[in-house]
Image (spheres, grey):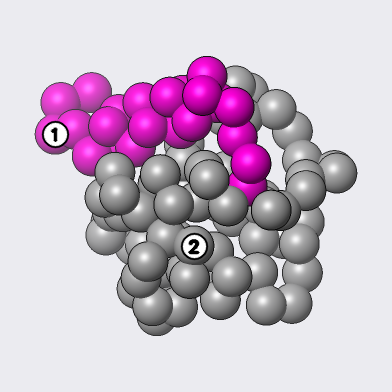
Amino acid sequence: MLYIITMKNIFEYNSYKKFLHDLILSQGRGAVSHLAKAAGCNRTYLSQVLNSKVQLTADHIYGIADYVGFTSEEQDFLILLLHYERSANR
């Protein structure tokens, strides 16, 4: 389980990508590899997600939420952020 000490509350985010970016910055070296493993994807794909219009899937997000140790409410919110960003209509 990953413990987030200096992170903002997930409910303060309006982008799952921004949350992941901040999470990686707070964890330091190896964080991208750990998150990619938790998501069930490779490091390159996760980097593409963070730096382009490529999106994660719900399965990826569930793996990350489990790894981070989110409550069910936090997990649900992260999934909503994913759906929001994947939506063609804003």
Q: Which residue is mark 2?
A: 38
The relative height of residue 5 versus residue 46 in the rendered view (above or below) is above
The relative height of residue 48 versus residue 7 in the rendered view (above or below) is below
- Residue type, label 2: Ala
Q: Which residues are magenta?
A: 68-90
Instruction: Answer with left or right where residue 50 lies relative to residue 26.
Output: left
Question: Which tag is nearer the camera, tag 1 or tag 2?
Answer: 2
Label 1 environment density (alpha carbons within 10 Å; few <14, some 14–19, many ≥20)? few
- Residue type, label 1: Ala
Label 2 environment density (alpha carbons within 10 Å; few <14, some 14–19, many ≥20)? some
Q: Position of residue 85 (x, y in %)?
A: 30, 37
Q: Which residue is mark 1?
A: 88
Work out whether residue 48 can be spotted. Answer: no
Which residue: 27% across, 59% down? Answer: 54
Instruction: Answer with left or right where residue 68 lies relative to residue 47.
Output: right
Of helix, strand and loop, which one carries label 1?
loop
